[in-house]
Image (spheres, helix red, strand yellow):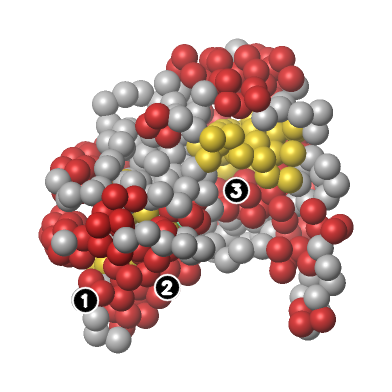
Amino acid sequence: MSNKLDSLPISDASMGISKRAEAVRESETIAIDAKAKRLLKEGFEVINFSIGEPDIGTPNNVKAKTIEAVRKDITKYSPAAGRLDLREAIAKKLKDDNSLDYPPEGIIVSSGAKQSLYSAIMATINPGDEVMIPRPYWVSYPEQVKLCGGVPVFADTGEGFMPSAESIRQKITRRTRMLILNSPNNPTGMVYGEKLLKEIAKIAVENGILVISDEIYEKFIYGSKHRSIASLGSDIKELTITINGVSKSHSMTGYRIGYAAASSEIVKAMARIQSHTSGPSSISQYAAVEALSGNKDSVERTRKIFERRRDMIAKGLSSIPGIRLAKPLGAFYAFPDITEAFARRFGRLQGQSMSRTFAEKLLDDQKVATIAGEAFGDDRCIRLSYALPEDKIDEGMARISRFVG
Ligand code: PMP
Ligand code: GLU
């Protein structure tokens, strides 16, 4: 298959905008959050289930180190791959938590996990290469692949949104170069078990396919244990780029610290790219050392809070007629199927996105912000982030119930 960008028409209306930029969709998670915040500012009492961002404060020990960084003048350029003290702290974290052995040369720090993903795809994908993504997917994966000239190919998930080895195998072609995994999953909240990971690892090794394993929600699992696919053997480790960060685990989304662990060849290529595009702030990196090496009680406290909220939202959504929910097992998202609720309230739709219409009307009518499942490749569902206080979750459930009628 040829690179899609080559076949795009040059638009007269583009006013100098590149084909690449024209082909990319705005991140809907960020756009709807901005809209919800605008409405809040205008005085509307919005319940904002849109963005995936912990509402909990950054831990005090991390805050103290942030201030210390400024006081100590740790305010200068850092190496393209990140500060050595932070890469050492990440190496220790990967060993302790994930049974993964990487030297600091196998680790690169980026400006959030989003940039880690982008640098990784940029460093490994050639124009026309196919990148397989289980669907539903996080909004930025296909767009990043397209920005790098790759072709996203979707593998549909089955019951409970779990991918199967077979659905992945079926979509492999001569051009398949990479597979992107995300467990715990955004938007579905599913967690991939060891058996499935082993089957996927086998396929990747047999076909020489690189694997991006986005483990950003690792710390938020309710009832099972996280397993890193790279820890399943040396063959799969060689092919895997493990992505993680402190944004979610330590409520540090604004610090912009993410990281990748991979073969030193891939890490070197990513660092060459970042030496021209930039990396994270020195202050954030200094604070992230504390997040990974200091007292971690706050992470478990946050996990417990999210587990309680997961239970609340699962109960709340499941009790609304016409809404069906596969109970989330991790992360902080619920991804209910609203097909029946939609039909009851609005009848059948023609030629429009059901989830988008539902989410838009829900925001207009009840001031409840959610994200249309269509943005994640599944128009039957909407996504709710439950990273918000319990009274807001309660109020949100009451409003959705009223809306559905
Ligand atoms: N991967 C997934 C699945 C996410 O939901 C997010 C959310 N932002 C990211 C990566 C990026 O994280 P960061 O904020 O560290 O860039
Ligand atoms: N990842 C979060 C979400 O899906 C934050 C927004 C973003 O980075 O796109 O809502």
Q: Secondary structure at mark 3?
A: helix
* Quadrant in which residue 259 is drawn: top right
Q: Position of residue 127 (x, y in %)?
A: 83, 47
Q: Residue at x 38, y 50 (%)?
A: 381
Q: Amino acid at mark 1?
A: Glu
**Residue kind at label 3, given as amino acid type:** Tyr
Closer to the chain start, of discs 2 and 1, is: 2
Please name the residue that numbered disc 1 is placed on: 45
- The residue located at (49%, 19%) in the rendering is 196
Few, some or many C-alpha atoms within 10 Å of disc 2 (few <14, some 14-19, many ≥20)? some
Q: Nearer the viewer, residue 152 or 87?
A: 152
Residue at image coords 23%, 71%: 366
Task: State yes or no: discs 3 and 1 in contact (Cβ < 8 Å).
Answer: no
User: Which is more toward the observer, 115 or 66?
Assistant: 115
**Residue ID for mark 3:** 141
Q: Which residue is mark 2?
A: 34
Q: Amino acid at mark 2?
A: Ala
Give residue 346's quadrant in the image: bottom left
Spot occupied by residue 15 in the image (x, y as percentages of width and height): 78, 83
- The answer to whether any part of residue 172 appears in the image is yes
Is 284 left, or right, of 325 in this rendering?
right
Q: Which mark is residue 295?
A: none
- CA separation in Å, label 2 and label 1: 15 Å
Q: Is residue 397 above or below residue 45?
A: above
Residue under the image location 42 percent in, 73 percent down: 34
> Where, by quadrant of the figure, is residue 194 drawn?
top left
Cα distance in 3D space between marks 3 and 2: 21 Å
The quarter in which the C terminus is drawn is bottom left
**Rendered location of residue 59, percent (x, y):** 31, 51
